[in-house]
Every structure is written in C-alpha cells, then in structure tokens.
C-alpha cells in the first residue's frame, strides 16, 4: 500500500460549552444533570457586586441556603492559593468547583480541583499527566476575554523557591463545562480588557501560524482571529455591548485553538519578561505581538492575508498578500497604541536585560512552534527594535 499522508488529532474540550448572553443561568441545570449538589464557588473579588454575578449566585441558592463562596484569589495565583482552596474543598466535602473570574481564578480553581483529590504538594505534579486521581469537576465562567483557560488542559500557577511559574497539564484538567457569557465582560476596565483581547488574538494567531498545528486548530485560530480583529477595528469603543459576544466567543475559540496546539514566539518573549519583571501576561503579549509579526516578514504574508481577507472581504478581497498582511499588523498596533496599555520598557521597570530575556525566550518550550526558526539573536533584534 502507498504511504498515506495524514494527520491525527486528539481533540480536548469541555464536554459542555455554552456560549451566549445569559447562558450563566444554565449552570444549575448542568450541575443537576451531573448530580453535583455541593459546589464551592471560587469567585474573583474584583468583580465586586456586578449584576451578572449577583443573579447567578441567587440561582445557586438551594432551599434557602446560599452556595459556599471563596473570594480570596489574588491577581497572580500561587500554588499555595490553590492548595488553600483544596483544603476548603475537602473540609466541606464539595463535589464540584465553580470558577467565576479571569484566568487567575480559573487556573486557581483547576489547581484546587486537582489538589483536592491527589495527595502531596501541587508542585510535584508540574508537567504533563503527572497526577493519578481525577480532579473534581470544574465549571468555568470566564469574566474576561483573554486566557481561554475555561477550555484548556493547563493551569499556570506561581511557585516560590525558586520563584517561577509552573504549568500542570493533563486531559483531565479540562473543565467539565465552560459557560461563556458576555454579560460578565461589562465589569472589566477597558485597558485590562484591551490587553486580554490582544492576548486572545495572540493565542489565535500563534496557533494558526504554527506549522505543526492540526487543521482543526488552524480553523479555530483563523475564526477566532477574525472575530477579535473585527471587534478591535472599533478602536476605543470596542467594549460596547454589541461587540461583547464576539469578543467572548473569539477568546474561547482561541483557547481551543492553542489548547490543542501551542503558542509561539510572542508568548516566549511575554513569558520571559513576565518571569523576570512581573510584566502582566496580557499586556506583555499586546505590545510584543505587532513587532514579532513584523519580524517574521514576508514568511507570514500569505497566512496573515488570509485572515485579513476573511475579516474584511470587501476591503481586501483583491489586495496583495503584503498589503493585506500589513493591514492586520498595523491594525493591531493601532489598537494597542490607542488602548493605553503602555510600553514594554515601562512594564520592565524602565530597563531590560536583552541578553537574559532573549536567552530565556529561546529556551521556552514553545520556541519551536513559531512560523520561522527563532534563536536568541532573533528575539534580541525584536526587543531592540522596540526600544
Ligand atoms: Fe496568553
């Protein structure tokens, strides 16, 4: 038989994905269908008294008793944060975790769900499929459009001694359900939302541009990028109500795209300045995306042009690859510049160690996932061009 060229895909996703305005109200039904009667609600304290949260918590009140709530997740969660929640999960004999928040809350909840059913410290589970027992089911309701953690198999947590970020990965860490309700986005400050949206666009484009991505990840990546780019074209009014569903949907699709593939060099740089200078993840990706795409040059023109033409067929249907690709890159730069996200140098405290950051980026696990080969010298050139 002739050899057959084929690709095989193991596709991971929550068993239930609900998308739409008001879909949060379906949570009690999903819990009941799964026989989960005693969830712990882990909620982002920064949401405050948002109406979308208030009515959801009312729905979770059963027989007059409100659901147990944990609202002690810091902006950057540590393994200790997740372990403390796990202590509460065990003490209260909770049978599910409901995570309502941004990526930090969802990651903390995923870590807690794992720590509640597996012995020892969470750091011992760093890496892929290192844990044995099934974590408690996580019901994830993202309140920002950025990380895509509601649909991925990974949790990223801070660890000390040495100070670093650890990734715990496993197919069983994918949340049982994701409820993507754009009503939650109404409480996000525009500058934070802009950084998160650019992070989501980076997930979409890095999964789409990665040569080893499956056709499924590429399809999800291009659709996610189209949705997010169209919203970004609204400039400073991108958070108007009519855009929120597309933004939330784009972020979730981007999560599925990179969650079943990988990110790439933009994240390699963003994670490096995040580790060394504590630069916020979304903002770091936001300022690095444009310069990195520009550095790839004509190698990505055809791929990026396909995205631009899909987003605006009337405007770019007959434009050359170079013109259509450059419109995408300049559009991102305009959006990021207008959103007041700041500069890379500001995020790094005024100065940056180019040698250290470019060396770290080259050793990042995702370095080989870029559309062109990237070495430390390439990363250094990108960073130098931003100074
Ligand atoms: Fe990211």
Image: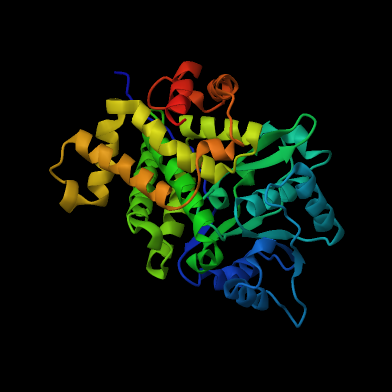
Residue 360 falls in which quadrant of the image?
top right
Asked where in the image residue 129 lies, by quadrant, the reply is: top right
Residue at image coords 18%, 46%: 316
Residue 199 is situated, as x and y percent measured from the top left of the image, at 48, 45
Placement of 373 over or under 164, stated as above or below: above
Number of numbered discs: 0
| Residue occupying image coordinates x 44% and y 50% | 253
Q: Nearer the viewer, residue 38 or 288?
A: 288
Quick one: quadrant of the N terminus? top left
Q: Could you tell me residue 210's position as x and y percent?
A: 40, 31
Q: Position of residue 71 (x, y in %)?
A: 74, 62
Q: Residue furthest bottom?
A: 64
Instruction: Give 160 or 29, whichever is nearer the viewer.
Output: 160
Q: Is residue 331 something one can see in this rendering?
A: yes
Apparent side of residue 190 relative to residue 122 in the rendered image (left or right) = left
Q: Residue furthest left?
A: 318
Above or below residue 21? Residue 202 is: above
Q: Position of residue 235 (x, y in %)?
A: 36, 57
Q: Is residue 6 visible?
A: no
Colour setup of the view: rainbow
Q: Most extreme residue toward the right, as rendered?
A: 91
């Amino acid at each position: 038989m002739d050899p057959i060229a084929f690709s095989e895909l193991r596709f991971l996703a929550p068993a239930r994905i609900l998308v739409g305005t008001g879909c949060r109200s379906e949570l009690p039904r999903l819990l009941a269908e799964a026989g989960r009667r005693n969830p712990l609600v882990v909620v982002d304290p920064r949401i405050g008294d948002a109406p979308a949260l208030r009515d959801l918590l009312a729905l979770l009140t059963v027989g007059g008793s409100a659901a147990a709530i944990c609202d002690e997740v810091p902006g950057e969660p540590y393994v200790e944060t997740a372990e403390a929640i796990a202590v509460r999960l065990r003490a209260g004999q909770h049978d599910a975790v409901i995570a309502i928040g941004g990526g930090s809350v969802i990651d903390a909840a995923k870590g807690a769900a794992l720590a509640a059913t597996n012995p020892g410290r969470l750091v011992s589970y760093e890496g892929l499929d290192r844990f044995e027992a099934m974590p408690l089911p996580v019901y994830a309701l993202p309140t920002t459009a950025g990380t895509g953690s509601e649909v991925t198999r990974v949790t990223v947590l801070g660890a000390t001694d040495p100070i670093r970020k650890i990734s715990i990965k496993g197919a069983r860490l994918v949340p049982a359900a994701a409820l993507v309700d754009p009503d939650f986005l109404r409480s996000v400050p525009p500058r934070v939302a802009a950084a998160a949206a650019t992070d989501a666009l980076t997930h979409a484009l890095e999964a789409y541009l990665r040569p080893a991505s499956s056709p499924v990840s590429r399809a999800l990546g291009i659709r996610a990028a189209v949705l997010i780019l169209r919203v970004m074209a609204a400039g400073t009014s991108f958070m108007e109500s009519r855009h929120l569903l597309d933004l939330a949907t784009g972020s979730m699709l981007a999560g599925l795209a990179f969650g079943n593939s990988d990110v790439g060099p933009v994240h390699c740089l963003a994670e490096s300045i995040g580790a060394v200078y504590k630069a916020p993840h979304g903002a770091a990706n936001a300022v690095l995306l444009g310069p990195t795409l520009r550095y790839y040059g004509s190698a990505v023109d055809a791929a990026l042009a396909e995205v631009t033409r899909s987003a605006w067929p009337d405007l770019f249907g007959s434009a050359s690859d170079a013109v259509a690709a450059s419109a995408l890159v300049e559009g991102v730069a305009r959006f990021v510049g207008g959103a007041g996200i700041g500069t890379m140098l500001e995020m790094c405290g005024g100065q940056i160690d180019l040698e250290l950051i470019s060396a770290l980026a080259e050793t990042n696990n995702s370095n080989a996932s870029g559309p062109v080969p990237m070495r430390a010298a390439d990363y250094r050139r990108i960073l130098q061009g931003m100074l």
